[in-house]
């Protein structure tokens, strides 16, 4: 790599490290504060809070890196222009297309980092986070199962356990579910077990009875059913959020491109939804070099002005916003109809065309301004 390319690339990487650190810190602190309030409110320790915030870090980094690449390219170009380095490079015969080569290498480098995150670290972190959330839901549920006292884990729910055996069996259980006044149910059982299922903690009632009191017009009917075994989902009552199976974002890109029956059963999604998620991941790293090139190429347009380059910076920000708007619109469109996954690559194509147009404008020979003839 020529020395001039190494110099520009080193400048961009230094600024990129600074902006990435600042932006990641801001995003991560905001996320950590909300997790801190939620987890400590549930009685969790500081180590659990630290673990959860660390597991959200790969996702935060993958979102922040393209923005940091744009900021580094724009700031670095502005600084080189202010110190007349770009003028010297262009006077030496380097065209905007030639100057853009190290910036493109820088953008591809950031894109590779984003690809490693979205295809590897983010799914692993999300899967681990889902497992830890399920474990905490189980722990919180067990904390509420206390013998000898009436408990009210949710509005309209009354729970009573006479005793808990040494092997974990719940003895003489009583549950009243009056969340719907027109359909109230009372469950009683001699024994019960708490088991962990894919949907969260489940209470298995053994040798019991259910009494359903239903309002039908002006009459009330009572239905009594005896059972040997009955399952009752209590995860949502204690955690406030029932588990609804796995998320597509918890799986690797390879499995999403060729979804198997186990993945579809765990997520409840269609094969087209899985492939749409995979293509969205593939398209995401393509925006990193585009963001860097927009920040560089826009600042090359226009000549010297004593008022600075604030107009070029404004246009660069608007260009990045336009590309991000197209990205969100394409994601929404593909989300409504997964068969339209090719639209996920449209923002990258539009952004590449925008960068080429900006470089073409920057490389055009500028005509000197004509002054009016003297009177």
Image (tube, helix red, strand yellow):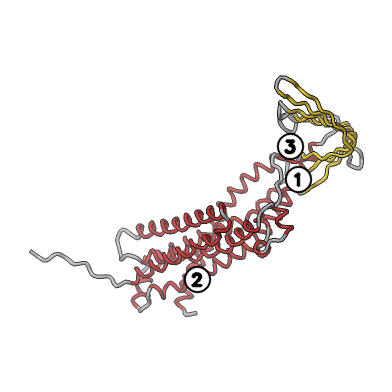
Which residue is farthest left? 375
User: What whole-number distance in Å separates the C-alpha atoms at marks 1 and 3?
Assistant: 11 Å
Q: Quadrant of the rendered structure where residue 211 is?
A: top right
Q: Residue at x 72, y 24 (%)?
A: 216
Comes first in the chain, label 2 or label 1: 2
Q: Residue at x 32, y 71 (%)?
A: 364
Q: Which residue is mark 3?
A: 237
Q: Residue at x 76, y 45 (%)?
A: 200
Q: Are marks 2 and 1 in contact (CB under 8 Å)?
A: no
Q: Within 10 angstroms of label 2, few (less than 14), some, or many (20 or more) residues?
A: some
Q: Secondary structure at mark 2?
A: helix
Q: Within 10 angstroms of label 3, few (less than 14), some, or many (20 or more) residues?
A: some
Q: Secondary structure at mark 3?
A: helix
The residue closer to the viewer here, 118 or 61, is 118
In percent of width and height, residue 149 lies at 83, 29
Comes first in the chain, label 1 or label 3: 1
Numbered circle sitting on residue 200: 1
Of discs 2 and 1, which sits in the foreground? Answer: 1
Give left or right: position of 149 versus 6.
Answer: right
Q: Within 10 angstroms of label 1, few (less than 14), some, or many (20 or more) residues?
A: many
Up the image or down, 210 lies above or below 15; here it is: above
Q: Which residue is mark 2?
A: 10
Comes first in the chain, label 3 or label 2: 2
């Amino acid at each position: 790599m020529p020395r001039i390319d190494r110099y520009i690339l080193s400048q961009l990487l230094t600024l990129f490290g600074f902006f990435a650190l600042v932006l990641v810190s801001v995003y991560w602190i905001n996320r950590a504060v909300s997790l801190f309030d939620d987890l400590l409110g549930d009685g969790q320790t500081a180590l659990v809070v630290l673990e959860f915030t660390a597991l959200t870090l790969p996702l935060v980094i993958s979102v922040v890196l393209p923005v940091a690449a744009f900021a580094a390219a724009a700031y670095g170009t502005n600084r080189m222009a202010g110190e007349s380095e770009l003028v010297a490079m262009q006077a030496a015969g380097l065209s905007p297309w030639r100057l853009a080569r190290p910036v493109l290498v820088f953008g591809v480098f950031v894109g590779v980092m984003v690809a490693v995150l979205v295809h590897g670290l983010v799914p692993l972190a999300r899967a681990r986070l889902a497992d830890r959330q399920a474990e905490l839901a189980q722990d919180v549920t067990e904390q509420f199962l206390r013998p000898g006292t009436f408990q009210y884990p949710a509005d309209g729910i009354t729970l009573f356990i006479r005793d808990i055996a040494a092997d974990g069996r719940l003895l003489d259980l009583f549950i009243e579910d009056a969340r719907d006044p027109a359909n109230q149910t009372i469950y009683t059982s001699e024994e019960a077990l708490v088991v962990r299922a894919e949907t969260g903690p489940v209470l298995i009632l053994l040798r019991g009875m259910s009494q359903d009191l239903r309002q039908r017009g002006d009459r009330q009917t009572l239905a009594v059913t005896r059972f040997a075994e009955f399952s009752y989902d209590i995860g949502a009552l204690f955690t406030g959020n029932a588990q609804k199976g796995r998320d597509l974002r918890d799986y690797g890109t390879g499995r999403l491109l060729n979804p198997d029956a186990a993945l579809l059963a765990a997520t409840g999604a269609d094969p087209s939804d899985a492939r749409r998620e995979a293509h969205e991941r593939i398209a995401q790293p393509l925006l990193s070099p585009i963001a860097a090139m927009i920040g560089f190429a826009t600042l090359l347009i226009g000549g010297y002005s004593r008022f600075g380059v604030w107009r070029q910076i404004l246009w660069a920000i608007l260009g990045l916003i336009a590309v991000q708007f197209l990205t969100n619109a394409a994601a929404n469109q593909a989300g409504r109809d997964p068969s339209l996954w090719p639209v996920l690559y449209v923002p990258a194509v539009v952004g590449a065309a925008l960068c080429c147009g900006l470089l073409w404008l920057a490389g055009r020979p500028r005509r000197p301004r004509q002054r009016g003839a003297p009177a």
